[in-house]
């Protein structure tokens, strides 16, 4: 592959990533990278739950920051206002001290749109 073709591929990849990230921006102007990364980590586990502790450890966030970022993705944000309603945050069935996150239907639909955009599917 010559340099011009490689540059063109890199540009196309950047455009696809921009389109995917813009989907979050459409939901909430100024959404933080940590919230986007938490969503993607939860989506990676789908349909299995993603433990909050894994989000905290993977993103290297404090417990409070993890809770705030996950709350932004649920139906009610950490301040009690409307959240993005993409994720369910549930008590772990084996340990009531722990919480698990999973995509709800709206979150699943967004993740499909994102993966389609990254794959270059123009039907998203």
Image (cartoon, helix red, strand yellow):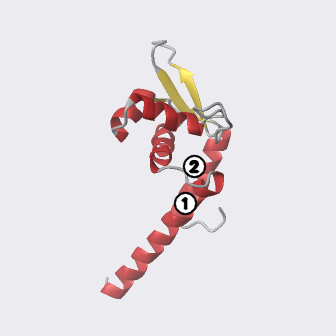
Q: What's the CA distance linking mark 1 and mark 2?
A: 9 Å
Badge nearest the viewer, 1 or 2: 1
The answer to whether 57 is drawn above or below residue 19 in the figure is: above
The answer to whether 66 is drawn above or below residue 40 in the figure is: above
Q: Which residue is mark 1?
A: 20
- Binning the other alpha carbons within 10 Å of mark 1 as few (below 14), some (14 to 19) or many (20 upward) gives many
Residue pictured at 61% horizontal, 55% vertical: 29
Left or right, residue 40 beside residue 72: left
Q: Which residue is mark 2?
A: 111
Left or right, residue 83 beside residue 8: right
Residue pictured at 56% horizontal, 65% vertical: 19
In the rendered view of the protein, which quadrant contains the C terminus?
Answer: bottom right
| Quarter holding residue 2 | bottom left
Counting every numbered tag in the picture gives 2
The reply to whether residue 119 is visible in this rendering is: no
Mark 2 element type:
helix
Residue pictured at 31% horizontal, 82% vertical: 1
Residue 92 image offset from top left, x and y in percent: 50, 18
Mark 1 element type:
helix
Left or right, residue 100 beside residue 55: right
Q: Please name whichever residue, 90 or 72, is drawn nearer the observer in this view of the structure.
A: 72
| Quarter holding residue 97 | top left
Residue 60 image offset from top left, x and y in percent: 33, 38
N-term-proximal mark, 1 vs 2: 1
Left or right, residue 45 beside residue 60: right
């Amino acid at each position: 592959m010559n340099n011009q073709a490689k540059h063109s591929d890199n540009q196309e990849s950047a455009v696809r990533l921009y389109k995917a990230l813009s989907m979050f921006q459409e939901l909430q102007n100024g959404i933080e990278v940590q919230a986007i990364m938490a969503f993607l980590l939860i989506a990676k586990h789908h349909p299995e739950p993603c433990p909050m502790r894994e989000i905290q450890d993977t993103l290297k966030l404090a417990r409070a920051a993890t809770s705030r970022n996950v709350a932004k993705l649920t139906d009610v944000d950490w301040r009690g206002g409307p959240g993005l309603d993409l994720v369910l945050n549930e008590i772990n069935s084996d340990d009531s001290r722990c919480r698990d996150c999973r995509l709800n239907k709206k979150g699943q639909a967004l993740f499909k749109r994102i993966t389609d955009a990254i794959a270059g599917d123009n039907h998203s």
